[in-house]
Amino acid sequence: MAAKTSEPQVAQAQNPEDTARKRQGNIQVVEFALGKELFAIDLFDVKEVVEYTTITKLPNVPAYVKGIIDLRGEITTIIDLKHRLNITESGQIAAESSRIIVLDDKITGTKIGILVDDVTSVSTFEPNQVDYTSASMSKEDTALIGIIKRRVKVKDKEKNELIIWIDIKQLLRDVNTSA
């Protein structure tokens, strides 16, 4: 799945309010599951999505670095996003059913893929569907851009579905120095 259609923005906003002001028009994201929660990253940060393949473990790397794969002749570092985000749950998804989201190396500076449980969709949202105040609650070093709210119908009732929108560049900014 080739997702890149325009040049990504390399500059990072310092806080979610800056990100909100810089965004004009609709927001396009890749949605994926980690455990029971839905997450999203900017579509233009994604190069492609590939099926799980055997990952070669590396010695003396941070625990969230799952290892490396050979992706069409290029060595790609794989980050276990569940581990990086400290997501723990009792029911583990079989690795073979997982997906790898390969990030655009123009924004990461190197070949990096993130291991997720499943990629659910590519979606477009209106800016008014994003709650940026949740991201600003944590003034610490956070990679949370905001919470995307979507109305879904479940058993003839409508409810809000929440999608955690993360800044993958911010979350992985230290990977180049540790892998």
Image (cartoon, rainbow, N blue to C red):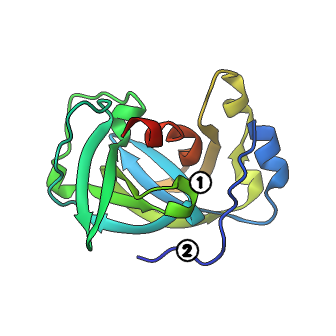
User: Residue at 29% across / 30% down in the picture?
Assistant: 63
Query: How many marks on residues?
Result: 2
Which image quarter holds the N terminus? bottom left
Residue 160 makes an appearance in the image: no
Residue 9 vs residue 26, the one in the foreground: 9
Amino acid, disc 2:
Lys
User: Residue at 32% across / 40% down in the picture?
Assistant: 35
Instruction: Give residue 52's position: percent from left, percent from top.
Output: 22, 60
Q: Residues within 10 Å of mark 2 (few under 14, many from 20)?
A: some
Q: Which residue is mark 2?
A: 4
Residue 156 lies left or right of residue 49; in this view the side is: right
Residue 178 lies left or right of residue 128; in this view the side is: left
Q: Which residue is mark 1?
A: 151
User: Residue at 51% across / 74% down in the picture?
Assistant: 3
Instruction: Give residue 125's position: percent from left, percent from top.
Output: 66, 61
User: Residue at 68% across / 31% down in the picture?
Assistant: 134
Which picture quadrant has residue 93? Answer: top left
Asked which secondary structure carries label 2, the reply is loop
Asked which secondary structure carries label 1, the reply is strand
Q: Is residue 38 above or below residue 90?
A: below
Instruction: Give residue 30's position: percent from left, percent from top.
Output: 50, 61
Residue 160 lies left or right of residue 126; in this view the side is: left
Sequence-wise, the earlier of marks 2 and 1 is 2
